[in-house]
Amino acid sequence: MSSHVRTLAAIDAFYDAALDDSLWPTALRKLADLTGSQAASLWVLGGSNGPRLQTTFITINFDEKSIQEYLAGMADLDPTVRYLVNHPHEPIVHDGLLTREHDSDTRAYYDWHERNVETRFRMVGQTRPVPTLQAGVALHRTRKAGRYELEDIERFATLQRHMARSLAIGFKLGSLGAMQRFGTEWLDRNDSAVVLLDEHRRVIFTNRAAQAFRSKSDGVRLSTGGIKLTYKPDNDRLQSLIAQALSPVASPHRSPGGAMRTPRPSGGRPYGICVVAVSGRLPALALFRPAVCVIITDPDRRAPSSAKTFRAAFGLTDAEARLVALLAAGEDLRRAAEELKITYGTARSRLAQIFQKTNTRRQGELIQLLLTTVVAG
């Protein structure tokens, strides 16, 4: 295989690894072969307490025990790492740029390296994918293979530019993936069912609590085509709220969405349902495009900490917090009063105080606020 073909293969491998980070060992092998190197590593430097090697450290052809010792402490003494920290904008770093210092840390590092690592020469390409991080690839040669000469460094410059672009792509995609995974895990821990609809009312996301509705038929039906309620008047109301949330221009007297309750064929306590518009401009090329969020609370599964959440969120008294927890769980005011063993008049008086503290004016507006707080809490 010609050098030109091998170069293109190495560059392609960079971009493949940017899309799938499990392919970085393959990319490192192609790069090591192309540059006459015996080992290679992908590294990330960053940290709030001074730059340190992070857990992203992928290597080929190194002894695992030596790598663990390096990460456990020797990396901080490594003169090359120290040079990279002090020269974050230098795209290529090699042995010729380093001076052999004679402090105790440097001697300790070189003594350890001589005993444990076969390679002797290094050439590093680095970039700054974000202002707080440095990342790059280090190539390593044995003493027998010889140091990296000027022509090796010049050839590596072309590869380094593609490596920098691929790392920038990889960090963006990896960050999005991490955020999505975190968001999904966070929503799955919530007792309320969360359903995201696109602009065509199709279901594009359900958390774990919402997925239960797919297997049971108790008033709410979920499918890829959308969300429907068993009873027609309630379903018409729900579809009206969804249409209102999808409307590009909300009425001055109505918020985009709303709240409602719906009975259950099983005779269980009614579900509380909140419909809210998903605001914010989405990226032009985004595949995941939520437009409406539907939150369903099941009073039989409500979290015991709801009252505590509402008390902290809105500065409510214990009595007020217990009342709003019942309202958020789908109870009407009269039934909530009965459960709390207070009169209906007392409940109305507390509700008036709650309106004032939550800056709401109607019970439907309050329930919408409460249900979204349940998800956030």
Image (spheres, grey):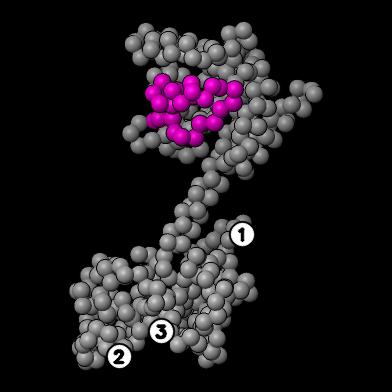
Residue bearing mark 3: 269
Magenta stretch, residue numbers: 51-75
Q: Position of residue 355 (x, y in %)?
A: 27, 80
Q: Which mark is residue 287?
A: 1
Look at 53% across and 89% down and name the residue there: 231
The residue at which mark 2 appears reads as: 334
- C-alpha separation, residue under disc 3 versus residue under disc 2: 14 Å
Q: Quadrant of the C terminus?
A: bottom left
Q: Is residue 216 magenta?
A: no
Residue 121 x, y percent position in the rendering: 55, 13
Q: CA distance from mark 3 to mark 1?
A: 37 Å
- Residue shown at the point (26%, 87%) measured from the top left: 337
- Which amino acid does the dot numbered 1 rest on? Leu
Res 83 visible: no
Q: Are marks 3 and 2 in contact (CB under 8 Å)?
A: no
In the rendered image, residue 119, in percent from the top left (x then y), is placed at 55, 14
Distance in Å between CA atoms under marks 2 and 1: 45 Å
